[in-house]
């Protein structure tokens, strides 16, 4: 029988779980069950079993991926995206184009549902990475991790001294304050994930997710809200490996998953107190999943490593820019006069009409002022990973035919911005 790529049908879950455990050591070590796989739907607005795809051969599931829908911040704009997760091909059937077929089917589904962007995380240079590049995904950015040993944390605690804030455990009574802090923080980044209240309660309070598909009991977590004179100023989410009931992080590892504060002074206190509590529980190795440059002083105590690699596929360029209109229009207030620019790329083209009051987008592609990006360059400029001046390189820009004013306008509207996907939300 020929290979069939289709959406989930009831009863597929056992074959999907068996495949995930064969293909991913994390799922095998953690002990993924069918009940776990089904329970991911609880409280997660973006995860539904019917959004799973399987590749079937002679009645056997030999390939799988899951489409996880997310709302992410691109500045003040909230954008719906397709997160592609858990792409798996059974080792006995690799090299037959199964993963590529699954990926193309996923992009088609996302396009049919009107989403403009598909995104995934992988290991740079891995077998999966090569498949995604072949399908047309961009090289976007690494998500970095800070790693340090116990003596580094002791030194940090000594150096940073005593800086006190009121601290309380996060629970349903104060979760709204934490949500507000998170949403304010999310708007300062690109790709931070929007979390409704039900999501917070399910994934942080009832269980504690240290990653989108891995969780433990709440007692293995540290969940702190920081206040200054009763005013919420920060929060942290951390995981204590020594208290874990399921194997994911090593037992001697303390993990800071999020540290958020209203300013750098408060952030220093949040990080310090969270590390202190992990150390007091016996952690010897510390991992901090924080945006690069979160707090410049961390590099004195921790080594920074490249982690998961972010890749993207722009399904509808005009649609993506339309969904960013609020953010782009806010940036355009610093623009003098009016300018029109045609943006071209392997993902399509769009016209931007930019004035000091708004940015409008059309699909006319008039080419009055034109900049043509590569697939890597387009996503990097939209996310703000690089400024336009940093991207005037053939790897990112194939052609530029713009006036000086148009270049200045584009540099203002598409400026650099921190990019980060919190680990709890990753797909």
Image (cartoon, rainbow, N blue to C red):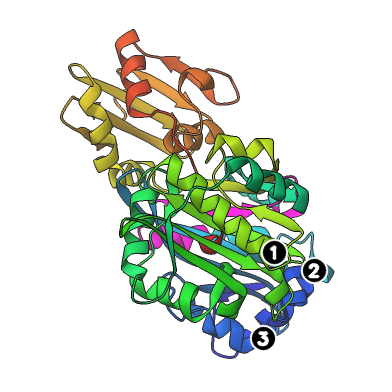
Q: CA distance from mark 3 to mark 1?
A: 24 Å
**Disc 1 versus disc 2: distance between alpha carbons?**
8 Å
Q: Nearer the viewer, residue 23 or 267?
A: 267
Q: Is residue 359 left or right of residue 80?
A: left
Q: Position of residue 15 (x, y in %)?
A: 68, 84
In the rendered image, the vertical position of residue 185 relative to residue 329, given as above or below: below
* Picture quadrant where residue 337 is located: top left
Element class at badge 3: loop
Residue at image location 77% in from the left, 75% down from the top? 29
Q: Which mark is residue 79?
A: none
Residue that badge 2 annotates: 93
The residue stretch that appears in magenta = 107-128
Quick check: is 123 in the magenta stretch?
yes
In the picture of the structure, the residue carrying the numbered disc 1 is 98
* Disc on res. 33: 3
Sequence-first disc among 1 and 2: 2
- If you read the primary sequence from the N terminus, does the residue marked by circle 3 or circle 2 appear first? 3
């Amino acid at each position: 029988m020929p290979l069939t790529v289709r959406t989930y049908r009831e009863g597929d879950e056992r074959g999907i779980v068996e495949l995930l455990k064969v293909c991913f050591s994390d799922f095998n070590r953690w002990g993924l069950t069918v009940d776990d796989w089904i329970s991911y739907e609880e409280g997660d607005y973006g995860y539904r079993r019917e959004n799973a795809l399987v590749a079937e051969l002679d009645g056997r599931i030999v390939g799988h991926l899951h489409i996880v829908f997310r709302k992410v911040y691109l500045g003040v704009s909230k954008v719906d995206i397709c997160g592609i997760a858990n792409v798996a091909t059974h080792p006995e059937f690799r090299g037959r184009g199964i993963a590529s077929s699954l990926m193309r089917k996923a992009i088609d589904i996302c396009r049919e549902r009107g989403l403009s962007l598909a995104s995934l995380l992988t290991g740079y240079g891995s077998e999966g990475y090569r498949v995604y590049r072949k399908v047309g995904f961009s090289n976007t950015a690494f998500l970095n991790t800070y790693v340090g040993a116990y003596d580094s944390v002791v030194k940090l605690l000594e150096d940073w001294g005593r800086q006190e804030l009121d601290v309380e455990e996060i629970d349903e009574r104060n979760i709204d304050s934490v949500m507000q802090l998170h949403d304010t923080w999310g708007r300062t980044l690109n790709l931070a994930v929007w979390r409704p209240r039900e999501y917070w309660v399910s994934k942080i309070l009832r269980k504690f997710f240290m990653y989108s598909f891995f969780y433990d009991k709440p007692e293995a977590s540290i969940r702190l809200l920081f206040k200054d004179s009763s005013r919420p100023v920060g929060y942290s989410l951390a995981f204590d490996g020594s208290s874990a009931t399921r194997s994911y992080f090593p037992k001697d590892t303390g993990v800071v998953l999020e540290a958020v504060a209203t300013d750098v002074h408060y952030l220093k206190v949040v990080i310090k107190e969270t590390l202190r509590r992990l150390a007091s529980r016996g952690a010897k190795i510390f991992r901090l999943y924080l945006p690069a440059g979160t707090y410049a002083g961390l590099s004195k105590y921790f080594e920074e490593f490249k982690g998961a690699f972010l890749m993207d596929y722009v399904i509808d360029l005009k649609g993506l820019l339309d969904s960013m209109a609020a953010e782009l229009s806010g940036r355009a207030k610093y623009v003098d006069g009016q300018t029109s620019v045609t943006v071209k790329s392997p993902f399509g083209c769009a016209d931007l009409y930019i004035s000091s009051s708004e940015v409008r987008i059309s699909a006319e592609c008039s080419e009055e002022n034109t900049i043509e990006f590569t697939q890597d360059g387009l996503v990097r400029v939209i996310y703000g990973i690089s400024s336009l001046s940093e991207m005037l390189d053939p790897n990112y820009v194939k052609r530029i035919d713009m006036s000086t004013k148009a270049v200045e306008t584009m540099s203002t509207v598409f400026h650099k911005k921190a990019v980060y996907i919190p680990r709890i939300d990753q797909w």
